[in-house]
Amino acid sequence: MRATVIHGAGDIRIETVPDATIKDATDALVKVTSACICGSDLWPYKSMEASEHGNRIGHEFIGLVEAVGSEVTKIKVGDLVVAPFGYSDGTCEFCHEGLQTSCVHGGWWATDDVDGGQGEAVRVPWADGTLVPLPVGEDDALMPSLLTLSDVMGTGHHAALVARVAPGKRVAVVGDGAVGLCGVIAAKRLGAEQIIILGRHPQRTSLAQEFGATDVVAARGDEAVERVRELTDGFGVHSILECVGLGESIETAIKIARPGGAVGRVGVPQDAAMPGSRPAFRSNVTVGGGPAPVRAYIEELMPDVLEGRIEPGRVFDRTIALDAVPDGYRAMNDREAIKVLIDF
């Protein structure tokens, strides 16, 4: 089968790899029908050291179940399913607590001997705990929005929950990528009164406004902090969704919080230490977050997608075939595309 393999910074290839097959009784074999490139995939695309053999990549996909192991009872051959960006058994203590990203048997796509999501098929460990059947056909017009449930919509929702977004709250979203844009959807869905998007790309911030953002701040650093305070009577916002992961973005998120506010971090941190700890301490600002347990949110968010109340699939502004994935990475890295959908 063919799949995406990264060999180093800027070096993405489509290669023939061993066919995905069932290895364990709890596995399912899924033929991928749609996948996508994530902003977090751009970190290795920018910085990975050269590798002769390369690594599989990709963690967001929808597909048809072609086979199941002998212990799989909930997922059936023929099901159209969405996969969260990490797999989980669905039975451990952390899964029962809704924290599937800490599952004792869980893990990540494209690691060890697990297939990456940007390929023609995927072996899914712990299929019953991981996969969620979709009540539509594979050609349904809602497929892009349903695909966002594998990561970016659930991740934006997680940031909003950690930041304690609630009706009447003032919210800021740091970052205008796909996760930040879905964070705007999440904040609007949870009843935020004011939603400020911090971003510098007009195409993206315009989409954020269509999703529910009330204000746009294109500045960075201290200028951005000053502008947010001007928009919030000098106090700052109650809730901040940090969707980038760079030191400057985290520090900005903390500085624009009002006393007693909360920051939900979902941008993959690029620094070992978190800046802004002293301002957070002085103002009693809560900082939390991490990899979003999107498996816990799929059933909650799916009805809003199916009934048209939210349209997160609009973050996809380019659709390509598998052979064009290397150019899809280039386009996202060069900010020519917000998020690229791969159609199989």
Image: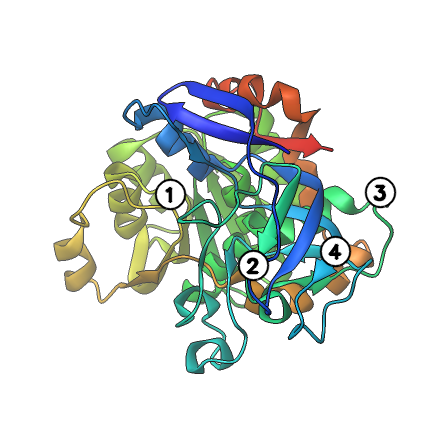
| Picture quarter with the C terminus | top right
**Foreground label between 3 and 4:** 4
Could you give the CA–CA distance between mark 2 and mark 4, rounded to whole angstroms?
15 Å
Question: Helix or strand or loop: what does disc 3 sit on?
Answer: loop
- Residue 286's x, y, as percent? 28, 65
**Foreground label between 3 and 2:** 2
The residue singled out by tag 4 in the image is 65
Q: State the residue in front, 187 or 237.
A: 187
Disc assigned to residue 23: 2
| Picture quarter with the N terminus | top right
**Foreground label between 2 and 1:** 2
Disc assigned to residue 228: 1
Disc 1 residue type (three-letter): Val
Q: Is residue 62 left or right of residue 122?
A: right
Q: Please name the residue shown 52% across and 80% down the image.
A: 91
Question: Helix or strand or loop: what does disc 2 sit on?
Answer: loop
Disc 4 residue type (three-letter): Val
Compare marks 3 and 4 and give the one earlier in the sequence.
Answer: 4
Disc 2 residue type (three-letter): Lys
Q: Quadrant of residue 50?
A: top left
Disc 3 residue type (three-letter): Ala
Compare marks 2 and 4 and give the one earlier in the sequence.
Answer: 2
Could you give the CA–CA distance between mark 1 and mark 3, rounded to whole angstroms?
37 Å
Q: Please name the residue shown 31% across and 28% down the image.
A: 48
Q: Is residue 257 left or right of residue 130?
A: left
Could you give the CA–CA distance between mark 3 and mark 2, rounded to whole angstroms?
34 Å
The residue singled out by tag 3 in the image is 141
Q: Please name the residue shown 87% across and 51% down the image.
A: 137
